[in-house]
């Protein structure tokens, strides 16, 4: 069942500082943590919150409490719903993490887009990064090396970069 892909439950309190939460997230290698009180989810704090609400706005992470920057009352998914439902929620809501709860609303864990898509997502990210990097270097080589014009005037390994065609007037 898909619940096996749910991340272990890492929680914080509203009074935890942003810096403490970020350190814990880095240590546990997670991108989000639930803010819980009395076994109920009151919020979620994500790496996006740290970036957009703290770092980008020059708020002090040592004194700022999670209650100030967390997303309060996040959408949740029950553990009996299909994984596709969680992915649809993420896509529709524009977020990457969904807390998983039982029938009573007690948090069980968290599923992320990366967890849900697993190796398919990682492979897609690798391919995209590789494609972008390769294209960048081909463009760079063409902009710096005038003989690499793709008109038959190239020699050796430069032929493997025929991305830009120059006109005979160049």
Image: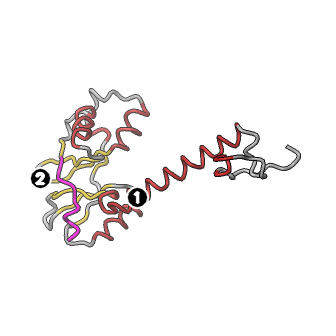
Query: Left of 67 or right of it: where is 135?
Result: right
In the image, which disc is placed on residue 39?
Answer: 2
Which is the main secondary structure of the residues drawn in magenta? loop
Label 2 sits on a secondary structure element that is: loop
What range is drawn magenta here?
1-10
| Location of residue 114 by image quarter | bottom left
Q: Determine which quarter of the picture holds residue 12.
A: top left
The spot of residue 51 in percent (x, y) is: 39, 38
- The residue carrying pointer 1 sits among few (fewer than 14), some (14 to 19) or many (20 or more) residues within 10 Å by Cα, namely few
Q: Position of residue 78 (x, y in %)?
A: 21, 67
Q: How many marks?
A: 2
Horizontal side, residue 134 vs residue 21: left or right: right
Q: Position of residue 56 (x, y in %)?
A: 43, 34
Residue at numbered disc 1: 123
Q: Is residue 120 above or below residue 71?
A: below
Q: Residue at x 17, y 53 (%)?
A: 8
C-alpha separation, residue under disc 1 versus residue under disc 2: 37 Å
Q: Is residue 6 magenta?
A: yes
Residue 114 drawn above or below residue 88: above
- Whole-percent x, y for residue 152 in the image: 77, 52
């Amino acid at each position: 069942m898909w619940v096996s892909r749910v991340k272990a439950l890492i929680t914080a309190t509203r009074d935890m500082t942003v810096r403490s939460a970020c350190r814990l997230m880095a240590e546990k290698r997670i991108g989000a943590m639930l803010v819980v009180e009395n076994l109920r989810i009151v919020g979620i704090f994500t790496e996006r919150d740290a970036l957009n609400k703290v770092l980008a706005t020059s708020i002090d992470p040592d004194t700022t409490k999670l209650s100030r920057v967390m997303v309060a009352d996040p959408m949740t998914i029950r553990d009996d719903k299909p994984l596709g439902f969680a992915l649809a929620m993420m896509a529709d809501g524009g977020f990457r993490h969904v807390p998983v709860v039982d029938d009573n609303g007690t948090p069980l864990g968290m599923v992320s887009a990366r967890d849900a898509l697993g190796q398919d997502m990682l492979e897609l990210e690798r391919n995209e990064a590789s494609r972008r990097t390769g294209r960048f270097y081909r463009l760079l080589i063409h902009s710096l090396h005038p003989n690499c014009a793709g008109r038959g005037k190239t020699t050796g390994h430069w032929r493997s970069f025929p991305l830009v065609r120059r006109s005979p007037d160049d």
